[in-house]
């Protein structure tokens, strides 16, 4: 991990230098097989996905879950990764190019409930570096505008078995825009949210929720799966 001093120093570097340093760092992690998250659901994905399955990663960021999904579904499977922030999307694309399987479809979109342009706010760490992990959609006017679309508008016809949603408070809108797919395919859904609206929508579709100790995520599973 970088020291606070190193991070503060990096914050003053030109954006393209920061991006280059990040690309090299993630490439090393991918080569060393240390490119992962400590969330327990990352490990549990192996119980939910098999070769040939499809998975959707909403708020893919730099691609920790995207890579996990890619490895598990294999060459015959498919991963759809949504990441609306251009700088983060650049890193995601570079990382995906290093994956063992060329089975990832990258979308520089936010998942929502309609095709539209939305504002995106990006907070900063105390070091001055941008906190892209906390990037969130907003109705307020912002310098960064991103495209959004509903997952249902893609009319995906593959066997979608897992949807991971990390949308920084936009989770209910994502679920609303994927309701047809969820009702038809009943995938396992991992959401970083305790939204009552999400719980109600998925409850209407027969889903039950559970949590894993030490995790901020909620897992929704359909009894038929």
Image (tube, rainbow, N blue to C red):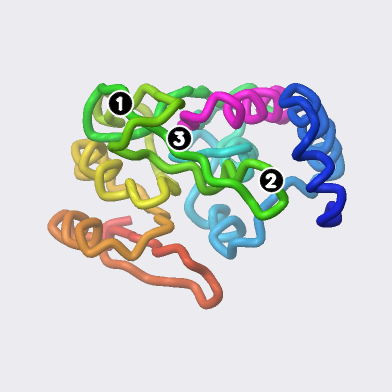
Quarter of the image with the C terminus is bottom left
Q: Nearer the viewer, mark 2 or mark 1?
A: 2
Q: Residue at x 31, y 23 (%)?
A: 117
Residue 149: image tag: 1
Residue placed under numbered mark 3 in the picture = 54
Badge 2 vs badge 1, beta-carbon distance below 8 Å: no
In the image, which residues are magenta?
Answer: 82-100
Gap in angstroms between the C-alphas marked 2 and 1 = 31 Å
**Label 3 residue SS:** strand
Q: Is residue 52 visible in this depiction of the protein?
A: yes
**Res. 218 image quadrant:** bottom left
Q: Determine the residue located farthest toward the left in the rendered image.
A: 204
Q: Residue at x 61, y 38 (%)?
A: 63
Farthest residue to the bottom: give it.
213
Q: Residue at x 33, y 60 (%)?
A: 221
Residue named by callout 2: 128
Q: Position of residue 103 (x, y in %)?
A: 58, 25
């Amino acid at each position: 991990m970088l020291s606070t001093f190193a991070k503060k120093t990096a914050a003053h570097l030109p954006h393209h230098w920061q991006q280059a340093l990040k690309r090299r760092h993630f490439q090393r992690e991918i080569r060393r097989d240390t490119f992962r998250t400590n969330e327990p659901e990352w490990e549990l994905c192996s119980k939910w996905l098999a070769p040939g399955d499809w998975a959707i990663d909403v708020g893919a960021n730099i691609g920790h879950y995207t890579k996990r999904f890619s490895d598990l579904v294999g060459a015959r499977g498919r991963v759809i990764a949504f990441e609306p922030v251009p700088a983060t999307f650049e890193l995601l694309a570079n990382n995906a190019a290093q994956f063992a399987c060329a089975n990832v479809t990258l979308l520089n979109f936010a998942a929502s409930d309609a095709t539209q342009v939305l504002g995106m706010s990006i907070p900063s760490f105390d070091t001055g570096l941008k906190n892209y992990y906390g990037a969130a959609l907003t109705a307020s006017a912002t310098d960064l505008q991103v495209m959004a679309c509903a997952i249902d508008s893609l009319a995906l016809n593959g066997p979608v078995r897992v949807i991971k949603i990390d949308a920084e408070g936009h989770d209910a809108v994502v679920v609303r825009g994927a309701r047809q797919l969820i009702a038809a395919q009943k995938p396992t859904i991992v959401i970083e949210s305790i939204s009552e609206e999400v719980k109600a929508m998925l409850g209407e579709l027969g889903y039950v929720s559970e949590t894993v100790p030490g995790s901020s995520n909620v897992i929704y599973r359909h009894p038929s799966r």
